[in-house]
Amino acid sequence: MVVQLRNESLSMQLNGLNNTSNRVFDFICLWILPLGYLLLLCALFFLPGRSLLHKLFYGLFSIPALLALCLRPRVGKELLNEPIFVAVLLFVAWALLSLFWGPSEQNIGGEFKPPLHTLLLFAGCYLLVRFRSEIIQPLLFCAATVALIASIYNLYMFARVYEPGMRLIGVGAFDNPLLSSHLFGFFCTYWLSLSMTCKRHQILWLSIPAMAVMFAAVMATGSRTPLVALTLAALWLSFICWNRRSVALLGALFVTGATVAVMFSRMINERGDSYRFEIWQMALQKIANHPWIGHGFNADLTLDPGIGFNLMEPHSFALGVLYYVGIVGLLPWLFFQAQGLLCSWRNRLQPLFIIASAWLVFGIGAGLTEGGGIISRPKEHWFLLWIPLALIAALSINLRARRLLAMPIKTVTASALQQLTANAQIVEEDGLGPKVLRLIDGSFLKLFRRRRWYTSGSFNPYSQRFAINSVQLRTMGIPTPPILDLYRLEDGSTAVHYSPLPGHTLRQVLQGITAPSVRQTLVERFGKFMAQLHEQGVYFRSLHLGNVLVLEDGEFGLIDLADMRIYPSSLSPSLRQRNLRHMQRYTVDKRWLFEDHFEALLNGYAAMASKADVDNLHKQVLTGNSPVRAHP
């Protein structure tokens, strides 16, 4: 008896530790990493200095990402299967190895921090996309809106004090016109990408003036490098999207280029080549001393092109890589950029790949004549390479794991929709019309009404959520309806076309059973299925007996999947209780599950869940007094 009590006590302690680690992991992935990523993108516009950005990134992104990997090491295995990350890892490893032939008088230990934080950027982005993919587009939009507001303020303040020859620097952590132009160009590229990919006119009419404001900020810096980079990004967007807007973009690019050449020719030509050719020639001479292995990651670089002071960078990222880590380091550096563009081209149907690849092309263009530090702390140069590349790698990993939408969304005209739904049977409707239709071939078409443009549904339509949830649940071994097509209608609504699962709803099956023992057995099996969902982190907000199917083979399946979220860990007690409260709202469900066969439900739930979770379920039902409603 004493041994049994000790075992139970030990089991409870281990279960408590496991629950604590799960809650910490969930909190990091669901809340800390999104906040850290948002601040990484836009904090330079309002922070007083870069040192604060470093602290915010360390505290809200890289260290939490490291803690999450320590809590659950197995989730990091997918990173090692991504070619982009493997190439980055090899590049970082070679850079650190080069410390052995670099200057020995420096503190080598401190040189490990920037590469580590760079790798953790990739790990954090992977976790963010894996567990909060639906928030990525709203986060980018929010950061771009902050950048837009800050740029409007910067332009207003600059116009008040402008004198010929002045160059915009901007408020916040900006202290250099050229470095400021990287951020302005980065978000100008975002708004340009959004104007090419958005489907709603409200977003389009916002993105075009926003892009104009960001471009004006770039011009006000007087920097020519981002103009080349923006041109390359626009050309890339016109071809990766290639639609009617591409023709308009190419035309606008030609007109804008001609206008800038005529109106700002003095700004472009007055500084000549800014000693770039002299700087590059001197850098190549130094590179020639150690062309294969470089001078070492921590080596010093001083160039004097005869301007009265020394320069610390070769003003070219490629030359910087060659100088510090040589040709051996240049190979993975070239590979992960080429792989990023190739991966984005292959997945160009996904808007996030288009945005991230446009950022990468902008960074490649800007890096032709700017930069040189290969691995640094978070600063403006991160926006030219590491931030877009980390996003592309994270998207690639999760798309391969089928956590992201992989099928195209087809635009359907009113006549095509009418033809598709001809002679269809209305299964469900509301005051606005049909919601679910059974087509003549037996498949189903579920319609989702247009939402307000500023809601999350404008970034992640419910039809896409339905499809993604269906695919993810199937990979978890839970039967769901196979998705046939996704549609976007002319009025802004969306639809999902799917094949039905062969079976009947659990409510219908229970209604048809007359023997209490048979019904009790089925309820017990449902309790086990519900526990399986909760243990796998599936929070199905609309879970009730009408959305659970009993299939022909006796297994359970799920339908009506748009209102669902899959958490990183098993559900917390509060989410489990919320699921129960929803089922208690239905009169028949409540009687069968929580009155007549409650013990059977608990026994089934106990087969998959811990004793503490079963006790919480028991307590919730006994104390719950939620109002019930009859199912129509």
Image (cartoon, rainbow, N blue to C red):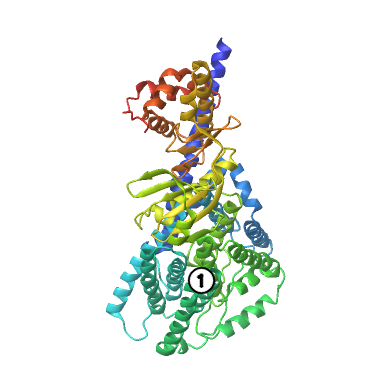
Residue 515 spot, x, y in % from top left: 50, 17
Q: Is residue 381 or residue 454 the one in the foreground?
A: 454
Q: Farthest left residue? A: 160
Q: How many marks?
A: 1
Q: Residue at x 44, y 64 (%)?
A: 198
Residue 377 visible here: no
Q: Farthest right residue? A: 292
Q: Residues within 10 Å of mark 1 (few under 14, many from 20)?
A: few
Q: Quadrant of residue 288?
A: bottom right
Q: Farthest front residue? A: 423
Q: Amino acid at mark 1?
A: Asn
Q: Residue at x 58, y 13 (%)?
A: 3
Q: Is residue 186 or residue 516 the one in the foreground?
A: 516
Residue 323 visible here: yes
Residue 323 spot, x, y in % from top left: 64, 72
Could you tell me which secondary element the residue under label 1 belongs to?
Answer: loop
Residue 335 spot, x, y in % from top left: 66, 65
Q: Which quarter shows the C terminus?
A: top left
Q: Is residue 301 or residue 138 the one in the foreground?
A: 138
Compared to 320, does 483 lie above or below? above
Q: Which residue is mark 1?
A: 243
Q: Is residue 474 or residue 194 the one in the foreground?
A: 474
Compared to 275, does 296 lie above or below? above
Residue 84 spot, x, y in % from top left: 63, 59
Left or right: where 385 falls relative to 171: right
Q: Which quarter shows the N terminus?
A: top right
